[in-house]
Image: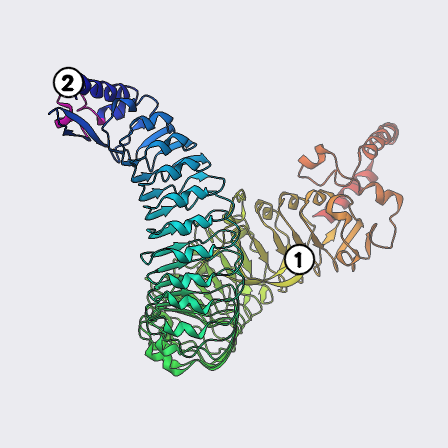
Amino acid sequence: MSVLEAQKEASALLKWKSNLDSQSQLVLESWDREVDLCKRWTGVTCSNNSLSESTVTSIIITSSSLKGNLSYFDFASFQNLQVLVLYNNSLFGPIPSNLSDASQLKRLDLSLNHFSGPIPYELGMLRHLEFLFLRSNSLTGDIPKSIGNLTNLAHLYLFENYLSGTIPKEIGMLQCLQFLYLETNSLTGEIPKSIGNLTNLVHLYLFQNSLSGTIPTEIGMLSRKFENLDLSSNNLTGEIPSSLGNLTRMYFLYLYDNKLSGTIPSELVGAYDLVDLQISDNNLVGEIPDSFRNFTRLHRVYLFSNYLSGKFPKEINLSNIRRLSIDNNMLSGPLPRVGELTETFSASDNLFSGPISPEIGNASGLIELSLSRNQLSGPIPNAIGNLTSLQFLNLGDNMFHGTLPNVPINIVAYSIKNNTMEGEIHSSICSSIFLVFFHVSNNMISGVVPDCFKNDSELTSLNLYENRLQGLVPRSLQNCKSLQVLDLGKNMISDVFPQWLDTLPQLQVLVLKSGSLHGPINTSRSQLPFPKLRILDISGNLFTGHLPSNYFENFKAMMDINEVERVPRYIGSEIYKESVELVVKGQEMKIDRILTVLTAIDLSNNEFKGEIPDNIRTLNSLRYLNLSHNQLSGHIPKTLRNLTLLESLDLSSNQVRGKIPPELTRLTFMAVFNVSNNQLSGTIPQGGQFNTYETNSYQGNPALCGYPLPNKCRENEVATSLPSSPLQEDDDSTFFNGFTWQSVVLGYACGIVLGIGFGCVMMIKGKPNWVLRLVNERKLRDD
């Protein structure tokens, strides 16, 4: 190569540099005509040819924040360029088709940039290419058929783009291909059978696409070098090919999250080197093959969310399996030999029966044990409390009896809800410093709640709902600064309202319903009481005094909630799911997962008196409000119209009087409205949701009239029920409540006539003492 050729290469690089942004030019500051191209230019490597002249063979600039595009890169100037690596920069725009002018390229890596548009068909002309890395860009369109011309290609990485269309059958011509990564795109159609021709293939990753059809049996014809197959998260159908058992060196087999059917082929055991088998989330049926006993190297087996049935094979050695998940199937019979378990065993949502063997105590390395929603019975072995590695224990929704096992020292989540456990809660609950979730609701546990929680407690959820607990609400709970959910409902706890809980900064759910709590609700001196409370249920107690109006104006988490979220969020986590039982729209309902936008106040079935506080209007994100079965009096505040998200309002069985404010017809989400058994009068407003409420919403108010009640309103009562004008709605006084503009005009006209008459009488008779007497008597009554 002549000196002129070398100058041509330098000029081409300088031209590209000049079209990059200023920061990129600083990165490439060493690119200068006064500096030797092959010795001191950043990222540039040269080699000597037969004419003893240097030529650029490699350009490698990675993770340097280069910003620009390749449209100004003159690839034709680099006839000996073999390596172009611009990995992890900020380059954008299309991949230029003239890239094929650098005809000697062996390695091309443009990964982790912002390239867009299609993969140029001309890339198929780079016949020396061995490594093609275009992953993690924004490329679109089809994989070009010309890719089949790259017969020297060993590595093809196109994953994490937006590629569509089918996988071209020409890909089967790449005889040297070892690693094929096309995952996380939008590819459709079937997996081409020609993939079976790739006799040197080691890894095949096609997951997270929209591929359909069956798994080609030809994949089982791949070489004995083949190690990893990942076809998960597609729309594949049909059966798992038995030919996959021919891949004797395969380590990982991922077919989960598809629509595969049929049985698990027993021939699969031919892949005896298999370490990780994940075929969950499909439509597989039948039994787990007995041949699985021949898998000696399996560490992880995920078969959950299928329709597998029958018994778990006794012959399978679990001592080598670190993680076994068979949840959500129809497996029955006794549990596997749990004493052999090593790390994780999850078998929830099946039909397993019988006891847990005391041999569970031998599983010293067990981290997670999840057996909820089965038909297991008998006592829970005390040995579980001695498993020092155990972090997650879920035995809920079975038929266990006996006493609760101690809380293991390193436990994070402990759930034995919905069984028939007896005895007391052991003080070990306070010794487990990592405990986050403790859920033993719906049992027959007695005694008191241990009052031993310390300041370093990580406790986030304490759910003891529906047991036989007595005593007081533990004062030490105020040390649990991370507490989000406290549910002590349906017990026999006898205490005053624990106002010291209002200082807990993270508390979102407080349920003390159906107990023996009593007295007025007093607040602490906290400036921001209950700053995150979303659900308050203290119904069915003996609380007295007035409603806690000072709390209403401080429930910030029930005000101005932003509901514009792409994905619903829940209280708790995927590991432990929070649940609660609430009276929703008049019926007690179990809510298995609590949305963060769910807001509710239930103060029903107590002995509260006085009026409904006007400041409840500030809770404009409240959905459920139940104040029924108390001794409340006064009027229904028309400012309840501000609760625009309200779905259920229950004021029944009180002593509320006056008219139903027509402003409430604005509450367009209110599916349930109950004001029965009060002292309300006048006509029932019409319009909006009020046209849907039935008779039982109003019964027990003899002075109410209008639809849907059978008693008709008199003409003057009908007139007062029409919706008020905007002027009235903006006025918080009750002077104009129920009057139409016609009645106001009529009254105004009559007033003029009467005023003239009264004026004449006053001029003739003098001071009108009888009028003054009427006014004074009215004032005394109002006072």
Please give the name of the residue rendered at 35% of the width and 42% of the height, measured from the top-left corner.
157
Residue 228 appears in which quarter of the rendering? bottom left
Specify the quadrant that holds the N terminus.
top left
Furthest residue in direction top, as rendered: 4
First along the sequence among labels 2 and 1: 2
Q: Quadrant of residue 174?
A: top left
Left/right of residue 208 with respect to residue 614 in the rendered view:
left
Q: Main structural element of the magenta stretch: helix, strand or loop?
A: loop
Mark 2, other Cα within 10 Å: few <14 / some 14–19 / many ≥20: few
In the image, the segment drawn in magenta is 27-43
| Badge nearest the viewer, 2 or 1 | 2
- Which numbered disc covers residue 3? 2
Left or right? Give the position of 416 relative to 323: right
Q: Position of residue 232 (x, y in %)?
A: 45, 54
How many angstroms separate mark 2 from mark 1 (CA)? 87 Å
Q: Is residue 550 above or below residue 20?
A: below
| Snapshot colouring | rainbow
657 in the magenta segment = no
| In front of the other: 170 or 135 | 170
Crowding near pointer 1: few (<14 within 10 Å), some, many (20+)? many
Amino acid type for the residue under numbered disc 2: Val
Q: Are marks 2 and 1 in contact (CB under 8 Å)?
A: no
Q: Is residue 457 above or below residue 193?
A: below
Asked whether the viewer can see residue 400, the reply is: no
Check disc 2 and report its element: helix, strand or loop: helix
Query: Of the residues shown, which amino acid type is indicated by label 1?
Result: Lys
Asked whether residue 42 is drawn in magenta, I would say yes
Percent x, y of residue 583: 62, 61
Q: Which residue occupies the foreground of this view, 375 or 109?
A: 109
Taking depth in this image into account, of 477 and 14 the one nearest to the observer is 14
Circle number at residue 314: none
Q: Which residue is mark 1?
A: 585
